[in-house]
Amino acid sequence: MNDFSAGNLEKYDYLQQTGILASLENLKRENRELKRTVRDISSLISFTDIDSMLDYLIGQFLDYFMPQSVLFVVKIPRKEELRQFFYQRMTRSNYRLPAGSFETLFKYFSGFTPSELYGKTFSSDEIRSELDSSVLDTLYSDLKPKFIIPLVGIGGVYGISIISERIVGNDYSAAELDYMHRMFSVLSVTMQNGLHYESSISDPKTGLYTCDYFFTRLANSIAASRRYGRTSAMLMLDIDHFKRFNDTYGHLVGDKVLIALSETLKRVVRAGDCVARFGGEEFSVLLSECRRDNVFPVAERIRKAVENMNFQDKGQVIPVTVSIGGFFFSDMPNITPDYITSRADKALYYSKEHGRNRTTVFMPGLLDRANLELNQEQTD
């Protein structure tokens, strides 16, 4: 062995004996963890809707430490409503935490200041011993929580997240807990921003989109038809004889009809379609990337779903029907949201004038193209 190799070996032995090499390895590992966290946070804040945020976060958990279940429960701004997202073995599930359990936990966390909650994970056993409430029995029997994390935003606590044991059965490491703290601290802010944005574009009574937001989506569909050749359709719905509901049964029943119809519309259409309350008892639906031969069948499916709603008040079945008008559009020159709306409205008027509880769909023809060209010439 030459003097150079011997000298390096002595240095290595010295570094190993003093613990410097182990410290360097720890620093490298912490650096890798930090890079991962920064990368994941950057991706998380790029999402604007709640579902995408949570789906991304759950995907990262699945790749990192795999809890058996994760539950998010949040209060919706301006509403007395809870919104829940439950993942069982990292797959979305329909489980719902009882409102009483949530309120008990919410009240507990509301007793802290935001600074006391920031970046903190609460042991479920600690909380249970503090509260000693039978209201939480369902929570512990159903979910078997390991940690309960408050979601803190502007104004304090607005929700909670419940993390179970890991699927593999091992305890969470310090690095995993640190990652969890950082991600939840960012998620608390991004989720609250997303909820407030959803609230700003939603009709407070029905939970559907507002008319203004609908026109934004309609303009985006027109742009997509011009750029990518995509086809879409707009439907307008009007509750038949709605004034009779208010006159006969009262305005409270009329409001219940609006809410029941809204729930039916959200259930029947695709997740990517846009359903809005256009005004009063009128509703609109934007069928994104819809083929010409699908418009009428989709509209009829909506009409029949409303007809079969079986709406009841005080044990009395009250029939509810809608008239529907639709307009299919593609890459037509000079087409505007106002023009599409006017054509869908004319189709709706035709349905109402010809018996109600029916569907009329207008397809663009030569007359439409001529009118659009004429309108453009007059504008120029």
Image (tube, rainbow, N blue to C red):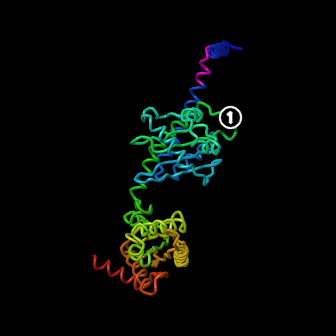
Q: Is residue 124 above or below residue 311?
A: above
Helix or strand or loop: what does disc 1 sit on? loop
Number of numbered markers: 1
| Residue type at the position of mark 1 | Asn
Q: Position of residue 4 (x, y in %)?
A: 65, 15
What residue did someone put label 1 on? 170
The C terminus: image quadrant: bottom left
Asked if residue 179 is among those painted magenta in the image, a careful observer would answer no
**Residue 100 visible at all:** yes
**Residue 294 visible at all:** no
Look at 54% across and 75% down and name the residue there. Answer: 298
Look at 49% across and 51% down and name the residue there. Answer: 82
**For mark 1, does the 10 Å Cα neighbourhood hold few (<14), some (14 to 19), or many (20 or more) residues?**
few
Question: Which stretch did the figure color magenta?
Answer: 18-24
Determine which quarter of the picture holds residue 335.
bottom left
Q: Is residue 379 above or below residue 275?
A: below
Q: Nearer the viewer, residue 34 or 175?
A: 175
Look at 45% across and 75% down and name the residue there. Answer: 329
Q: Position of residue 98 (x, y in %)?
A: 56, 49
Q: Is residue 178 above or below residue 50?
A: above
Q: Position of residue 117 (x, y in %)?
A: 47, 34
Is residue 14 toward the left or the right of residue 234 in the image?
right
Determine which quarter of the picture holds residue 168.
top right
Look at 42% across and 33% down and name the residue there. Answer: 115
Which residue is at the far right? 1
Magenta stretch: dominant secondary structure: helix
Q: Is residue 345 above or below residue 24?
A: below
